[in-house]
Image (cartoon, rainbow, N blue to C red):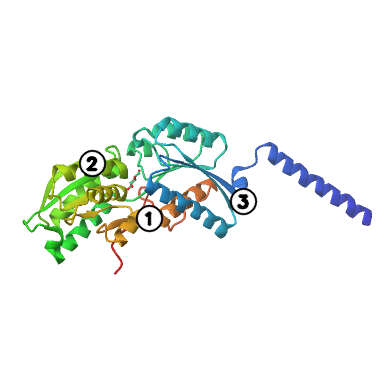
Amino acid sequence: MERRRTVWGKLVAVLVVLSVCASMASGGCRSQETKEKNSIRVGVSLYRGDDTFINNIRSELENQAKEYEKETGIKVKLDILDAKGNQNTQNNQVERFLSLGCDVVCINPVDRMVASGMIDKAMAAGIPVVFFNRQPVEEDMNRWDQLYYVGADAKESAVLEGQILVDLYRENPGALDVNGDGVVSYVMLEGESSHQDSLIRTEWSIQTLKDGGVPIEKITGGIANWERSQASAIVEQWLKDYQDTIELIISNNDDMALGAIDAIERAGVVQKINLVGIDATTPGLDAVQSGKMLGTVSSDKEKYAWAIMQIAAAKALGREIPEEIPLESGKYYWCGQQIIQKKQ
Ligand code: BGC
């Protein structure tokens, strides 16, 4: 009896070992494999690591990866690379992520118009992609059902930015029409011309002022490509060209508004110039809090990064995207935004 049990025991053990080997040799059944995954590999390529807003998103992504690990016990290997504004570099980074066996790739495209090359590679490897902040064209996004986009709606940002000014004007017209001549004379600082946010933010901030009944007059505008130093140089010149006439600076983002503040401080301008931005970056929030900037618009960066991480992890694990992440057309997640003004 004892001997028979040992023989049966051995036989069962041999069968188990054989079936495990057979499944390993065949590469294993994918659903079986994903079910058992206890770590995922996520490759992230940033268009520019020195962009303040992107830097804030990067830190949040790192936090969210840790949070995800804590909550699920699944290890997240997060590889973040900086493409330094070069599309070729980014193409190589994405190729490398794919060949290294990343489960999902998150891309903040350098040139959002040519995302198709990276999409081709991801499709060939069967690896899902989560784009963020720089939106590929719709035609490209529609090429595959494993492409996602996380961003903040540009029109919403601009309407909220304009609303800061409309509210102030309604409360006290003199706070915006500083020289009391009946019109608010403004200059506009714009982001990269190829970025979906620039045109829309420029158009809708102004439209909101018009709709809100603020009498405005444009003095001039310029493209400072989201950059503090470029904005600073442009505004330095404007302060010379349009001495004492600028009452308001509307900026497509906080960094350019900060560049304008740098120029104003350098020039020692004494008359009041109001400034508004978008992003609520860390230095942007400081400028609001110290009263240098009237207000900004925050796209909740924690939620932004959370959405990227949740979509990426679900895809990496072969799971459904959680219901708390409503996707427009099955692929776009729009992060909520709000006005930020000085805490009293
Ligand atoms: C942000 C900018 C940032 C740009 C980068 C925009 O949505 O507002 O601050 O430089 O994205 O793509």
Residue picked out by circle 2? 234
Q: What amino acid is labelled 2 in the image?
A: Ile
52 lies left or right of 170: right
Q: Are marks 3 and 1 in contact (CB under 8 Å)?
A: no
Specify which label sits upstream in the sequence, 2 or 1: 2
Mark 3 to mark 1 CA distance (whole Å): 34 Å
Specify which label sits upstream in the sequence, 3 or 1: 3
Compare residues 253 and 125 and report the one nearer the observer. Answer: 253
Residue 38: numbered disc: 3
Q: What amino acid is labelled 3 in the image?
A: Asn
Report helix, strand or loop for mark 3.
loop
User: Which label lies toward us, 2 or 1?
Assistant: 2
Specify which label sits upstream in the sequence, 3 or 2: 3
Mark 3 to mark 2 CA distance (whole Å): 52 Å
Q: Say whether residue 191 is visible.
A: no
Report helix, strand or loop for mark 2.
helix
Q: Say whether residue 301 is visible.
A: yes
Q: Are marks 2 and 1 in contact (CB under 8 Å)?
A: no
